Image: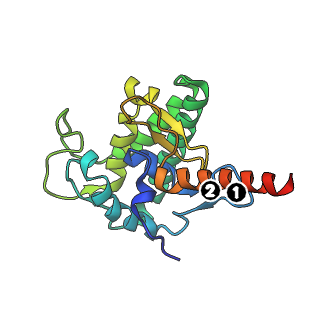
Amino acid sequence: MSVAWTRHRFSGGALALDTANTVVLRGDGERSFDRFDDPLEIARFAASASGYRADELKGRALAAPDPHAIVTKVIAIRETTDQLFRRTVIARALPTAGMPAFLNACADGLAGSHELLGPNKPFGASQEPLAFEVALAVSALSLLSSDTVSRMRICPNCGWLFVDRSRNGSRMWCDMAVCGNRQKARRHYNRRKEVANA
């Protein structure tokens, strides 16, 4: 079954976190599922990310013409990114123990690429579409900046990772319109239930 790659699926604030969040209900053994179980979803995700992550990508389109050929690299970057930055949020510091696997996965994503990356063009300046695994590695590596690390959060509703880019750093949910509203509705329901049972 194909996924509807809507704006909500890109609530992480960075391509690498959106990709990490393609495992739904991570940590819940009974209900968790992987949206990339079908590798063809990687290509569909990349196409949607080209639009939803246009600011981060500086307008560069992404391409995954043969998702079966890159699935191992993509999953390795996704999993090491999630592990490293989930631990970072919990510890409130970047754990060095997760760095070698993360850096190796990113290096594999960049292997064979001949892009020229720079400070003003972190995803290169070519007009050609950028390979998804290359963009994913670049996005993941960009998360290591101290400002981004300090703003990394885990959504208390869905467990997704996101970067809080709000001015005062007080954003609670990955997406207020979805997770924030669900939590509000849940609290409202529980209050009404308590009143009814009183």
Residue 70, picture quadrant = bottom left
Which quadrant of the structure image shows residue 129? bottom left
Which residue lies most toward the bottom here? 1
Where does label 2 land, which residue?
185
Answer yes or no: is residue 145 visible: no
Residue at figure coordinates x 24%, y 44% from the top left:
123
Q: Which mark is residue 189?
A: 1
Q: Would you say 125 lies left or right of 10 here?
A: left
Residue 113: percent from left, percent from top: 27, 47
Is residue 125 visible to us here? yes
Q: What element carries label 2?
A: helix
Q: Which of 2 and 190 is in front in this view?
A: 190
Question: Helix, strand or loop at disc 1?
Answer: helix
Real-space Cα separation, disc 2 to disc 1, in angstroms: 6 Å
**Horizontally, is 154 left or right of 162 in the view?**
right
Q: Which amino acid does label 2 sit on?
A: Ala
What is the crowding at mark 1: few (fewer than 14 residues within 10 Å), some, or many (at least 20)?
few
Residue 167: x percent and y percent?
A: 36, 31
Whole-percent x, y for residue 19 in the image: 45, 52
Q: In this view, does 57 lie to the left or right of 2?
A: left
Q: Residue at x 51, y 31 (%)?
A: 100
Residue at position x 68%, y 49% from top?
27
Tags 2 and 1 in contact by the CB under 8 Å rule? yes
Query: In the image shown, does 14 or 61 lie closer to the viewer?
Result: 14
Give the percent coordinates (x, y) of residue 34: 58, 61
